[in-house]
Amino acid sequence: MNRISTFRAAMVALSMVAFGGAALAQSPAPSPAPSAAPVPPPAETKSPADAPTAEKAPTPAPPPPAASVQNADPFGEEFTLEPKKVVVMKGTANWDAAFDTLIDAFKALTALLDKQGIKATGNSMIVYTSTDDTGFTFLAQLPVDQDVKSLTKDISMGKSPEGKALKFVHRGSYDNMDNTYEAITNHLDDKKLEAKDTFIEEYITDPLKTAEDKLVINVYVPLR
């Protein structure tokens, strides 16, 4: 069972509860009875300039400033993953400590590169290789342009995933990614698409330097 299906039932139940509460909260209040007082006819005027100020059409509100208008991130766009040389660390984690475990893996890879004076050439990535209700196995990857030495049993050289996938964007904390994966599941269902057993997260913001609630993560879902 992949992570998408793992969270689907719980998130749908939560969404139904939230929707029901919203519907109750948004029930319109009864409309007040109309006034029985007659409306006097407008005063006769000789020209538009003579019309009372109160009778003139209100001035339209100015549009919001450009800075406040944000384009929505693409959701479910077709994307081709290009393979990259990466240093890879294998790991396992339970969901309760998921983000801390991933951060520890990135720290270990970064420390190894720093020790050898090697700079990462791209964004940090997580490839989920299997998941269940309690946890998951993963590959933490950092792109590099040369081979890394002094590898351990958990760290090796490899290539990042390649091929056709759908791209989704998550903004915010790792804990809130359940909502993103629920939306991804709904998108796949609506389009009648079937995902492979693996999926990839690319951390556009550096997870070692960015506040967790400010994360920007691209999620790539390879299709069967």
Image (spheres, rainbow, N blue to C red):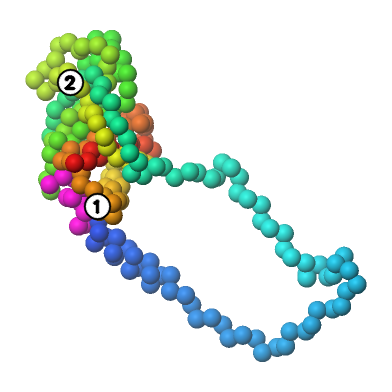
Question: Which of the numbered marks, if any, corresponds to residue 192?
Answer: 1
- Seen at 32% across and 35% down, the residue is 79
Residue 10 against residue 140 in the figure, above or below: below
Task: Rate crowding at label 2 as few (under 14), some (14 to 19) or many (20 or more) other CA atoms within 10 Å.
Answer: some
Task: Pick the residue in front: 170 or 192.
Answer: 192
Q: Are marks 1 and 2 in contact (CB under 8 Å)?
A: no
Helix, strand or loop at mark 2: strand
The amino acid type, in three-letter code, at marker 2 is Gly
- Number of marks drawn: 2
Provide residue 127's location: percent of width, then percent of height.
20, 33
The residue beneath circle 2 is 158
Q: Position of residue 11 (x, y in %)?
A: 25, 56
Label 1 crowd (10 A; few <14 / some 14-19 / many >=20): few
Visible residue check, residue 178? no
Q: Which residue sits at x=21%, y=54%?
A: 8
Residue 104 in the image, given as x and y percentages of width and height: 21, 29
Q: What secondary structure characterizes most of the magenta part?
A: helix
Query: Distance between the Cα atoms at labels 1 and 2?
Result: 33 Å
Q: Is residue 35 visible?
A: yes
Task: Relative to 90, say whether 173 is above or below.
Answer: below
Horizontal relation, residue 63 to residue 218: left or right: right
Closest to the camera, between mark 1 and mark 2, is 1
Q: Quadrant of residue 135?
A: top left
User: Would you place residue 192 above or below residue 99 in this image?
Assistant: below
Residue 74 image-quadrant placement = top left
In the image, taking residue 167 as reference, residue 157 lies left or right, namely: left
Residue type at mark 1 is Lys
Magenta region, residue range: 1-10
> Which badge, 1 or 2, comes first in the chain's sequence?
2
The residue located at (33%, 68%) in the rendering is: 20
